[in-house]
Image: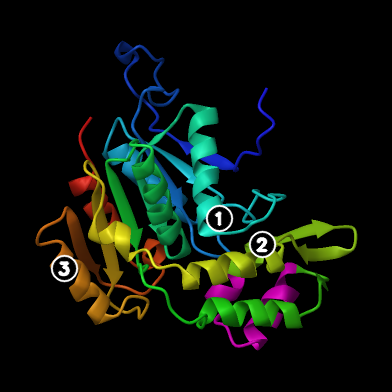
């Protein structure tokens, strides 16, 4: 048995397939299904994209989805340093090998978008690339470590390590300047014990991941994607994560490379703001198998 640590994941498959496929009805899709790996943003978890993944596999059989908790997120705790985009991508390779469920496509939101690009860089080196990457409201650019994620790190470090209730934690995060929706979402990272509620995240490790995200320039793989892979960037119209200059750069690359830019109405959390539009894109462009 392998001693390599595996990322936590949830496997999403369409129920109710006809038994003539060789699999009993209501027991999910064929093990030979093409797989969509779904990668969340910083402080998130695979479950953030469960609704969209479930709708995709219903709409586009025989696709299945893997909702993955990236290292030091969700249930994927205890991973050894270094904590970088490259080690996040290497974790995905281990997962694919150990489960025998390699991705035909990878969808990454925000932080997960750059992890997806890092995975593609590694896959190109071993000539085993996915058919598609979906980069959801993320940017290939390196930039200063500023923004809501940095503010959240500072906020949680200023708060108590234990709370009497989840509501107390939510209220404290709100008092630190975040809207209730974000505070409630962040509270999913609390674990209950006899002493109350405490964060189950290693914020020092997450800071290392976040800073590597900010300093990593992924434009080389975008400008010269490996043969056989399409890149689909999705820009949220009410988000400032991708600048108009970056969007135009992607459009220009797309004139000669299999790189597309889609603009979707909504804020950064497209999975919550406009899931129908995200689903429509995936339904239209995911390859047929």
Question: Where residue 196 sits in the image (x, y, percent)?
Answer: 85, 64
Q: Which picture quadrant has residue 28?
A: top left
Residue 8 image-quadrant placement: top right
User: Do callouts 1 and 2 mark residues in contact (Cβ within 8 Å)?
Assistant: yes
Q: Position of residue 152 (x, y in %)?
A: 61, 78
Q: Which residue is mark 3?
A: 251
Categorize mark 2 by other alpha carbons within 10 Å: few (<14), some (14-19), many (20+): some
Residue numbers of the magenta segment: 166-184
- Single out the mark in the foreground, 3 or 2: 3
* Residue 252 placement, left or right of 148: left
In terms of depth relative to the viewer, which is nearer, 211 or 68? Answer: 211
Residue 1: give its label: none
| Residue 26 seen in render | yes
Query: Label 1 crowding class (10 Å Cα cut-off): few <14, some 14-19, many 20+?
Result: many
Residue sitting at x 83%, y 71%: 164
What residue is disc 2 on? 189
Q: In the depicted view, which residue is nearer to us: 232 or 271?
A: 232
Q: Residue at x 21, y 39 (%)?
A: 287
- Taking the magenta stretch, the answer to whether it contains residue 178 is yes
**In the rendered image, which quarter contains the N terminus?**
top right
Mark positioned earlier in the residue sequence (1 or 2): 1
| Disc 1/disc 2 C-alpha distance (Å) | 9 Å
The Cα atoms of the two marked residues, 3 and 1, are separated by 30 Å
Q: Residue 34, how many percent across, how many down?
A: 33, 32
* Residue 181 in magenta stretch: yes
């Amino acid at each position: 048995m392998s001693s390599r640590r595996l990322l936590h994941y949830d496997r999403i498959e369409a129920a109710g397939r006809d038994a003539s496929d060789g699999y009993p009805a209501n027991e999910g899709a064929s093990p030979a299904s093409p797989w969509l790996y779904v990668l969340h943003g910083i402080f998130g978890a695979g479950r953030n994209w469960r609704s969209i993944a479930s709708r995709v596999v219903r709409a586009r059989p025989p696709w299945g989805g893997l909702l993955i908790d990236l290292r030091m997120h969700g249930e994927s705790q205890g991973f050894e340093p270094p904590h970088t985009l490259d080690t996040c991508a290497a974790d995905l390779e281990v997962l694919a090998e150990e489960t025998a469920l390699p991705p035909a496509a990878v969808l990454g939101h925000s932080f997960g978008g750059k992890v997806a690009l890092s995975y593609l860089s590694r896959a190109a080196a071993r000539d085993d690339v996915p058919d598609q990457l979906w980069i959801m409201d993320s940017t290939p650019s390196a930039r200063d470590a500023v923004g809501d994620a940095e503010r959240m790190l500072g906020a949680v470090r200023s708060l108590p390590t234990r709370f009497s209730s989840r509501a107390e934690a939510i209220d404290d995060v709100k008092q630190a300047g975040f809207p209730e929706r974000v505070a409630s979402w962040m509270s999913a990272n609390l674990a209950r014990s006899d002493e109350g509620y405490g964060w189950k995240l290693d914020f020092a490790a997450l800071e290392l991941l976040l800073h590597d995200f900010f300093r990593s320039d992924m434009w080389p793989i975008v400008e010269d994607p490996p043969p056989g892979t399409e890149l689909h960037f999705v820009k949220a119209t009410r988000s400032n994560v991708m600048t108009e200059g970056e969007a135009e750069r992607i459009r220009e690359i797309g004139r000669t490379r299999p790189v597309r830019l889609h603009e979707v109405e909504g804020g950064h959390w497209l999975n919550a703001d406009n899931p129908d539009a995200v689903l429509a894109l995936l339904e239209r462009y995911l390859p047929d198998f």
